[in-house]
Amino acid sequence: MSASRSEEADEDLLAAAEARALLNCPSCGSAYVAQVLGDNGGVSYVCTACGHSWS
């Protein structure tokens, strides 16, 4: 086994944090974006500045 479970979890958390840091609203460009979970388990995003939502 090349990496432990905790190392893999750390890598996943780091990738998610990097994605959030680079996430801007495609409509207004704001960085004020919330991640929301849909009814079917999918992930969507909502800009808290202009209200635009996307997935």
Image (tube, helix red, strand yellow):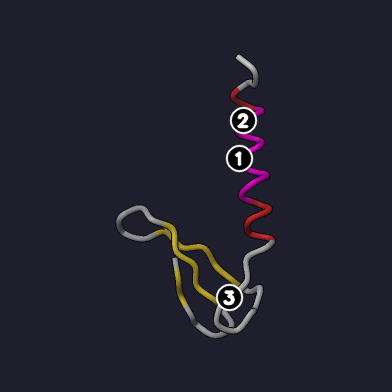
Q: In this rendering, is residue 35 above or below 15?
A: below
Using a 10 Å C-alpha cutoff, classify the residue at mark 2 as few (fewer than 14 neighbours), some (14 to 19) or many (20 or more). Answer: few
Question: N-terminal of the two: label 3 or label 2?
Answer: 2
Q: Residues within 10 Å of mark 3 (few under 14, many from 20)?
A: many
- Can you identify the residue that label 2 sits on? 8
Above or below residue 37? Residue 2 is above
Residue 10 counted in the magenta span: yes
Q: Is residue 54 above or below residue 52?
A: above
Quadrant location of the C terminus in the rendered image: bottom left
Q: Which mark is residue 25?
A: 3
In the displayed structure, does residue 55 sit left or right of residue 41? right
- Name the residue at 38% across, 56% down: 42
Q: Which mark is residue 12?
A: 1
Q: Position of residue 39 (x, y in %)?
A: 31, 59
| Of the pair 14 and 1, the residue shown nearer to us | 1
Instruction: Give left or right: position of 43 versus 3.
Output: left
Residue at the spot 46% in from the left edge and 75% down from the top edge: 53
What is the secondary structure assignment of the residue under circle 1? helix
Labels 3 & 2 near each other (Cβ < 8 A): no
Residue range in magenta is 7-16
Q: Is residue 40 magenta?
A: no
Coordinates of residue 52 in the picture (x, y in percent):
48, 80
| Picture residue at 60% right of the left edge, 14% below the top | 1
User: Which x, y percent locates residue 54?
Assistant: 45, 71
> Which residue sits furthest left?
40
Asked whether disc 1 touches disc 2, contact meaning CB atoms under 8 Å apart, the reply is yes
Q: Quadrant of residue 44?
A: bottom left
